[in-house]
Amino acid sequence: MSLRSALKLPKEHGAWAMLYVPFVLGAAVAGRVNWPVLLLLLSATAVFISRESLLVYWRARARGRDAAESGRTLLLYLALAAAFGSPLILAFELFWLIPLGVIGAALLLVNGKQATRMEERSTTSEIMAIGGLTMTAPAAYYAASGRWEMPALWLWLLSALYMASSVFYIKLRVYRLNPRKQAEQRQALRWCAFYHSFLIVALPALIFAGSLRLFAFIAFAPALVRTFWGMFAPKPKVNLARAGVLEIVYSLVFLVCAAFGFRSA
């Protein structure tokens, strides 16, 4: 048995980036790493990993199978999350983490319920999951700074908008691999074009209004170029390993540029 299977780690590699890139961004913009940040990291990680056991538990129960093992694993990870997270409220009095945690958990639970019905790959479901995962950005900023400020919400918005970009792009590339899904390809192309056109309009508008700095647009630039190039110059084959490495590079560019933009404000 592999380590991933033994620990019941989530299978979606991209979801790890959606969890940790916003987290690092929030802490970087706050400009410090302290005990609340470390405790939040451990608690958020335990909650994230517990989702895999929750899905196994729900699916087993829905099919009338024994779910005792997955139930025990779920409780173990939730207990770890509570152990690491409770000092944030009881000792450090970071009370704004409560509504953040409730909203994030609710979005992930709805996404998990959809996954038990095999609907987790729908655009709506994936966007909801992104909304929950990227809440680590404002949470990390708040834990590091001890202050609830407007930049925390901007970090969440930018992180969610950036991560959602990959949903539309990847769906388009996957549908193009199947020549029989012409209708799905056209719909994916329309949504991908609409979403990224929205980003091209909305980001400069926010920069012009003074809500964001130029580095916010630069942070999105590699993903925007990749998407429009992929839409108008599609490749017949997809190298998944290469695509995965490139997505990591794009995420790091987003992280560095967004952090620098907020830090220099």
Image (cartoon, rainbow, N blue to C red):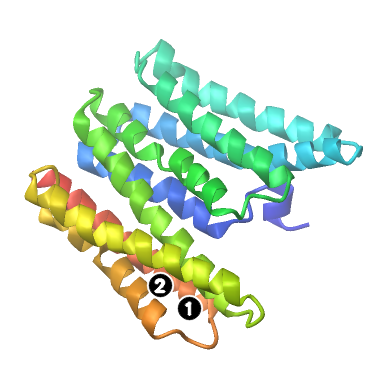
Picture coordinates of residue 242, whole percent (x, y)? 48, 78
What residue would you read off at disc 1? 242
Q: Which of 117 and 197 is in front in this view?
A: 197
Image side of residue 144 versus residue 98, left or right: left
Tell me which amino acid carries mark 1. Answer: Arg
What residue would you read off at disc 2? 246
Please say if 107 is above or below 207.
above
Picture coordinates of residue 67, whole percent (x, y)? 85, 35
Q: Which residue is drawn at 37% across and 72% down?
A: 227
Answer yes or no: do the residues labelled 1 and 2 have beta carbons within 8 Å? yes
Q: How crowded is mark 1: few (under 14 residues within 10 Å), some or many (20 or more)?
A: few
Picture coordinates of residue 169, whole percent (x, y)? 45, 67
Q: Residue furthest bottom?
A: 236
Picture coordinates of residue 59, whole percent (x, y)? 79, 42
Q: Is residue 252 visible?
A: yes
Give the number of the disc on residue 117. none
Q: Residue at x 53, y 66 (%)?
A: 171
Tell me which amino acid carries mark 2. Answer: Leu
